[in-house]
Amino acid sequence: MKMTREQKYRMIEQAEPGEIASLEKKVEQCHWRQAFHIQPPTGLLNDPNGFSYYQGEYHLFYQWFPLGTDHGMKYWYHLKSKDLATWNGAGIGIAPGDYFDSHGAYSGSALEHEGKLYMLYTGNARDEDWIRHPYQCMAVMDENGHITKWEHPVISNVPEGYTDHFRDPKLWKDGDSFYCVIGAQRTNLTGCAVLYRSTDLHSWEFEGELRTGLESFGYMWECPDYFELNEAGVLIFCPQGLEPSGDENHNIYQSGYVIGKPLNTGTRILEHGPFHELDRGFDFYAPQTMIDPQGRRIMVAWMGLPDIDYPTDPNGWAHCLTLPRELTLHEGKLLQRPIPELTTLRRNREDRVADTLFSESKTYEGFTGTAYELICEVDLLSAKVFGIEFRASETEKTVIKYNAVSRKLVLDRSQSGEPVATSYGVVRQCPWDKDHIKLHLFVDASSVEIFVNDGEEVFTSRIFPHPESDEIRFFADKGEALFQAVKWDFT
Ligand code: FRU
């Protein structure tokens, strides 16, 4: 049931007696609770925020509305980890409710400076006429883990030429200057990202718009992230309002990147190549990156999308985050690899198979489950199609396959279980032209992440199968395919 505006914009202290306990009970009974992904205790999770390394630990926050599965009053929920694989909940990081974030502590990022962790985020405020006023606000974590919000925002107005859709600052440091990019909408209703500069994190100067080649590219850009990788400049952002074309842009909103020369912070020119979607699956949005002490650029995203109902809504919770992935640059594109630390989630038992399939579908001893990692390498000999059906039963299956005739990798969730967002299609695909394919799957109670050939392509999706749909079948159509696979159950 949808909440009224008043119900949605309540602080957690304003919950009715027993309301949270009854939500918790519904959540507990849900068979789509994840085994190894970050998910909210109750309510709705969306963007990852403040992803950082501080005082010997990784810190990650997420957008959280505790009291329901609507996009209501957003908090930052805080998690910590020593290894990026196992996370401990640390409770509320930033609570909204001041004049500058009266209607939510929206997305933002974190940066360590002089022994403290600075978190720059968007305060979402609404006035009596429900007009939105975005503020950019600072909260600081000290050595003892205490987080204090500053009394006033550091950026209190939206510059001329932009609407109140102005949010999601991503911080970085270059020399003696701090910068942030902010997602914006021009008054002509096109999206862009703008740049601010500061020398002390207190006072911020509006430098102007990032000058990209994407003048008219959607009506709003959310969650921009700028960084440099191997001397290239990378801008990740989430444009809203792109039209689908071919295999591209089939989700309600997109998440992608452009790569080019490093941003010239003086002229704000970013010379870049084409826009690429980051992910080929159904549920991926609002990614955020950080650089870790080993120099790795690591990305986490929301495994969900705005403005879509999900099957867990009636169970009082919604969404999870993706697994952390390391980004590297290869031939003008970003590769995404699951971080090696995830191997610590493997249980002792290991199942292996090597076989040749000839126009058939087969199952193997040990190859079943609802939470596992599976690596399958295949060589297509004469087969027209090779694929894996997983979370399968007589009536359900999720399918990843390579079709050598159309030369496409295809993820089919038409029979995955409880349907979701079917008006946006039930199949996602992308071009592929290699006969040696490595499919690296992370399957959880209600999701799958598939890394193809070490992150050349990734399919990230929620699926909502029955808990008893746990079969794994390997198949080849019209010919021969040689494959080997290894599987580890998870936590
Ligand atoms: C993206 C987003 C951000 C905003 C946040 C609010 O999913 O809409 O632009 O800061 O979510 O929760």
Image (tube, rainbow, N blue to C red):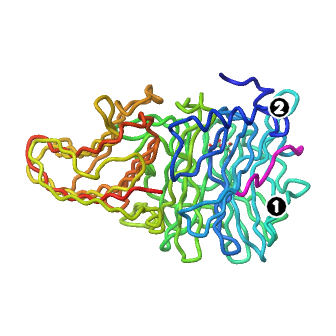
What kind of residue is marked 2?
Pro
Q: Residues within 10 Å of mark 1 (few under 14, many from 20)?
A: some
SS at mark 1 in the image: strand
Q: Is residue 399 left or right of residue 489?
A: left
What residue is pinned by disc 2?
17
Q: Looking at the image, is 258 positioned above or below residue 82?
A: above
Residue 423 visible to the viewer: yes
Residues shaded magenta: 90-99
The answer to whether residue 358 is left or right of residue 98 is: left
Q: Circle 1 sits on which residue?
A: 147
Task: List x then y, in percent, for residue 456.
Answer: 35, 58
Query: Quick check: can you spot residue 181?
Result: no
Mark pair 2, 1: CA separation = 28 Å
Of residues 489 and 207, the one nearer the viewer is 489
Residue at image coords 36%, 53%:
441
Q: Is residue 96 magenta?
A: yes
Q: Name the one closer to the observer, 31 or 156.
A: 31
- Tell me: is circle 2 under 8 Å from ligand 1: no
Amino acid under disc 1: Ile
Is 304 part of what is drawn in magenta?
no
- Residue under the point 43% across and 51% down: 276
Residue 115 x/y as whole percent: 77, 76
Q: Identify the mark nearer the N-term, 2 or 1.
A: 2
Depicted 155 relative to depicted 217: above or below: below
Please state, as top left, top right, bottom left or bottom right, where the N terminus lies in the image: top right
Q: In the image, residue 229 lies at what x, y percent?
A: 50, 70
The residue tagged with tag 2: helix, strand or loop? loop
Q: Nearer the viewer, residue 421 or 353?
A: 353
Left or right placement of residue 69 versus residue 411 in this view = right
Quarter assignment of residue 465: top left
